[in-house]
């Protein structure tokens, strides 16, 4: 299993300006992961051209816990909070998408068939919706892009990497966006969104 230093080095070679590491968490491990990731970022950022952003992905967390764990994550030092959305390929609890939006997370990952109302709420709160480069989760990318266009929700492309071989090159990230139906201007907007998100973290 690769460590965080290896992940950082691999994306540095790919030319990333920044990368957020957001391991899966719930109340059983959130206080274990984040402080160690914050420490690793403090140590590694002195030596890497790529900035490591400490984050967390709340995964299969019951909707009623998402707000509390989002607050806890930020208290522990997470600079980016992601919620594992209602992807069509996993049994995510209904209500997860709206709970994440109400909690004010940074990214709602692979939100599946997110409703127009939910996407509009995400847009109002400045929450990014993910276009996923991961097999399975990517099946609704086109739908998510369409809903985002209708509601003004902002999009990012994410590799959803679970190992060193999953990281996207810049070219492949653009292809994920284009595969979701975005034109050249839409791809450029995603570049701006990702830069804004990295700078805010």
Image (tube, helix red, strand yellow):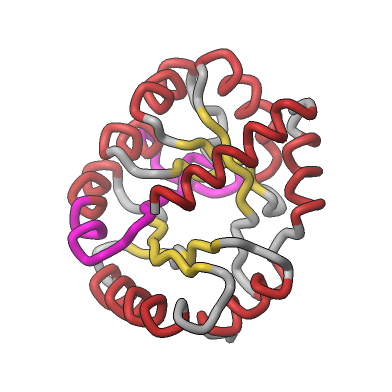
Q: Position of residue 126 (x, y in %)?
A: 39, 31
Q: Position of residue 151 (x, y in %)?
A: 51, 15
Q: Residue at x 39, y 44 (%)?
A: 106
Q: Is residue 92 left or right of residue 79?
A: right
Q: Residue at x 79, y 52 (%)?
A: 172
Q: Position of residue 192 (x, y in %)?
A: 59, 38
Q: Residue at x 49, y 40 (%)?
A: 86
Q: Is residue 184 left or right of residue 121?
A: right
Q: Is residue 92 magenta?
A: yes
Q: Is residue 105 magenta?
A: no
* Magenta segment boundaries in residue numbering: 71-95
Which quadrant: the N terminus?
bottom right
Q: Is residue 186 left or right of residue 126?
A: right
Q: Position of residue 175 (x, y in %)?
A: 81, 43
How many labels, in total?
A: 0
Which quadrant: the C terminus?
bottom left
Judging depth in this view, the residue of 73 and 85 nearest the camera is 73
């Amino acid at each position: 299993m690769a460590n965080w230093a290896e992940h950082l080095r691999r994306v540095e070679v790919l030319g990333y300006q920044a990368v957020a590491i957001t391991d899966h968490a719930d109340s059983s491990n959130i206080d274990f992961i984040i402080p160690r990731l914050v420490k690793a970022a403090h140590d590694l950022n002195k030596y890497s051209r790529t900035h490591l952003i400490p984050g967390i992905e709340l995964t299969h967390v019951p909707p009623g816990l998402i707000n509390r764990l989002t607050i806890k994550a930020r208290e522990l030092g997470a600079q980016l909070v992601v919620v594992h959305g209602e992807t069509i390929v996993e049994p995510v609890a209904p209500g997860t998408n709206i709970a994440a939006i109400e909690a004010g997370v940074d990214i709602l990952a692979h939100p599946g068939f997110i409703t127009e109302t939910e996407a509009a709420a995400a847009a109002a709160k400045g929450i990014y919706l993910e276009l996923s480069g991961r097999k399975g989760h990517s099946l609704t990318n086109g739908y998510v892009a369409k809903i985002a266009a209708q509601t003004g929700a902002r999009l990012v492309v994410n590799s959803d990497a679970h190992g060193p071989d999953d990281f996207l090159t810049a070219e492949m990230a653009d292809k994920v966006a284009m595969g979701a139906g975005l034109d050249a201007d839409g791809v450029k907007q995603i570049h701006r969104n990702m830069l804004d998100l990295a700078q805010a973290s």
